[in-house]
Image (cartoon, rainbow, N blue to C red):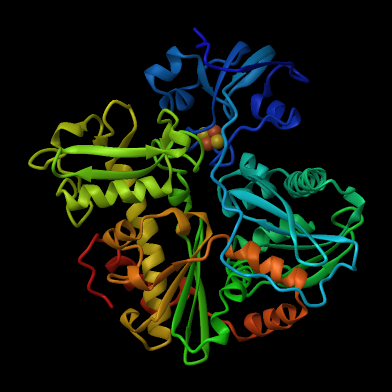
């Protein structure tokens, strides 16, 4: 029954008969993804498991396919171990995590003394990156991993809920332990002693920073969305032997990560009308016009990170990352990360695929998939819903996936329009659009324009900054002038709360269509 493509088998014993498999996996540090935080809704916590297991309940059954059941797949958040169980793990996947940016770093009164070392850390909801520097500003080593908190949910709200239902401590411990391990990794890579690292600048969104610093993020999850802290604080009790600086956040949903992105873009020093967007599970963005800086955050959800999409995947080995239709041959071409056999589709692949569906007429401007009358008809099929299936795979983009992407891209675009309205400019007047983060760096800009994720005709004005949050944190570690500037950015940033904003909802509804959007 169990396929032999799995490379590792673990024998696990419950502490008591009926212990949830998810608890055993947490205890044993087995890295399984729980996108909905174990709330029994996403159907993504699939594991190949055998042994003394609880029966499949009707709700678990509904989330499994015939093929899953045939292959011994169960959902880890449903299953209980009644006795010893064996879990089969597939090959470790390498993830495409962006560890660099476009800034040239300068050194001026670094936080660490001569002969000591410091790290810049970016805690993303999905990934964590840690970079080691010496006091001259030389980059010595980098470590990047998926954020192990993903076992508590794919997005900040799932993790806040998990913390409320269980406890925050386990989530806080997970990120602190992960960073401690990454510090050891970069020390070993650079051939220095771990205790020679004396300083760290740790950035991230407001929720991640609450978990990291041991604060309760519960109040971020509910109106009026008041965080316990907006940071700009120094801590000596989080990482062993290290003074940690956490840069300022602006609000519950505009975190130090966006503030660091603004810092590293250097946009405050220029006269340009500039938009900066960090597309993650929340779309954090800011617009600078005539010296006024406005910012907001829109709940894009995790669709662009592959979560909630039927065959969605993080950007890791085997994920379809680019898609293209060749009109001359009539072939759909696609690339996978590391050229591995296709295992799913990540955000950049989804954006390309939807742009292709739109360009070929297989999808109407309202997002409806057409089964016939288009060049992709041979690849369209209808099961429970209409879907496009990638040739020679079982990977599909379904009608439901398109609806989720419509909601996500509408949230981002409506945020952009609402900011430009607040600044009384049109998006045509923007001199430059900075895209930050992995997704913003890996997406095809033409496809992003086609689906209405970024303003039309903005491709030539768009600049990908890479991991700009990490680069901002590096600047703060190495340069005292950056530490002065960051306060100015957070003080001057005028936050617009979109949940109570009159125009945002109209913009959101108007942005739901694929082009032609006519709301600018
Ligand atoms: S169904 Fe198990 S984590 Fe979502």
| Residue 227 visible | no
Identify the image quadrant of residue 20.
top right
Left or right position of 155 against 350 = right
Q: Is residue 129 left or right of residue 267?
A: right
* Left or right relative to 287: residue 450: left
Judged from this view, the residue extending furthest toward the top is 1
- In the image, residue 137 sits, relative to residue 214, either above or below, namely below
Q: Position of residue 194 (x, y in %)?
A: 88, 49
In percent of the image, x 30 and y 63: which residue is there? 449
Which residue is painted at 40% across and 77% down in the image? Answer: 418
Residue 294, x across and y down, in percent: 51, 82
> In the image, 71: left or right of 66?
right
- Residue pictured at 20% horizontal, 33% vertical: 379
Percent position (x, y) of residue 3? 50, 11
Query: Which percent across, then down, holds residue 150?
Result: 61, 43
- Residue 486, image quadrant: bottom right
Q: Is residue 354 above or below residue 12?
A: below
């Amino acid at each position: 029954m169990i396929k032999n493509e799995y490379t590792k088998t673990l024998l696990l014993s419950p502490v008591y008969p009926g212990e949830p498999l998810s608890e055993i996996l947490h205890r044993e540090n087995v890295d399984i993804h729980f996108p909905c935080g174990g709330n029994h809704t996403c159907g993504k916590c699939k594991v190949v498991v055998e042994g003394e297991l609880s029966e499949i309940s009707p709700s678990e059954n509904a989330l499994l396919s015939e093929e899953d059941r045939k292959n011994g797949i169960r959902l880890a958040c449903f299953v209980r171990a009644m006795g010893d169980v064996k879990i089969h793990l597939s090959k470790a996947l390498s993830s495409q995590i962006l560890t660099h940016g476009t800034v040239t770093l300068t050194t001026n009164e670094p936080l660490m003394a001569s002969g000591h070392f410091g790290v810049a850390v970016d805690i993303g909801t999905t990934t964590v990156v840690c970079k080691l520097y010496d006091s001259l500003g030389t980059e010595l080593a980098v470590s990047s991993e998926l954020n192990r908190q993903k076992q508590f949910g794919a997005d900040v709200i799932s993790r806040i809920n998990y913390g409320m239902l269980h406890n925050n401590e386990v989530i806080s411990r997970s990120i602190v332990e992960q960073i401690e391990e990454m510090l050891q990794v970069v020390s070993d890579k650079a051939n220095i002693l771990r205790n020679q690292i004396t300083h760290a600048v740790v950035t991230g969104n407001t929720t991640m920073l609450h978990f990291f610093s041991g604060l309760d993020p519960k109040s971020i999850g509910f109106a009026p969305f008041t965080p316990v802290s907006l940071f700009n604080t120094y801590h000596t009790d989080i990482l062993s032997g290290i003074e940690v600086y956490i840069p300022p956040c602006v609000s519950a949903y505009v975190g130090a990560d966006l503030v660091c992105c603004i810092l590293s873009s250097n946009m405050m020093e220029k006269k340009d009308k500039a938009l900066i967007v960090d597309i993650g599970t929340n779309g954090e963005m800011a617009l600078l016009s005539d010296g006024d800086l406005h910012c907001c955050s829109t709940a894009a959800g995790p669709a662009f990170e592959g979560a909630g999409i039927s065959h969605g995947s993080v950007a890791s080995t085997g994920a379809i990352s680019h898609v293209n239709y060749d009109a001359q041959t009539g072939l759909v071409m696609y690339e996978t990360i590391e050229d591995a056999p296709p295992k799913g589709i990540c955000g950049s692949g989804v954006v390309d695929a939807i742009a292709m569906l739109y360009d070929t007429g297989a999808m109407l401007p309202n997002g409806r998939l057409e089964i016939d009358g288009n060049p992709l008809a041979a690849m369209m099929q209808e099961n429970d819903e209409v879907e496009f299936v990638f040739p020679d795979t079982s990977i599909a983009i379904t009608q439901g996936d398109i609806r989720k992407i419509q909601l996500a891209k509408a949230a981002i675009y409506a945020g952009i329009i609402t900011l430009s309205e607040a600044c009384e400019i049109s998006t045509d007047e923007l001199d430059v659009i900075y895209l930050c983060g992995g997704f913003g760096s890996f997406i095809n800009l033409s496809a992003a324009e086609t689906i209405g994720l970024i303003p039309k005709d903005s491709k030539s004005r768009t600049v990908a900054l890479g991991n700009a949050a990490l680069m901002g944190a590096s600047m703060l570690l190495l340069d005292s002038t950056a530490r002065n500037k960051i306060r100015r950015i957070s003080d001057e940033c005028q936050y617009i709360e979109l949940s109570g904003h009159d125009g945002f909802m109209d913009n959101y509804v108007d942005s739901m269509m694929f082009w032609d959007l006519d709301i600018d």
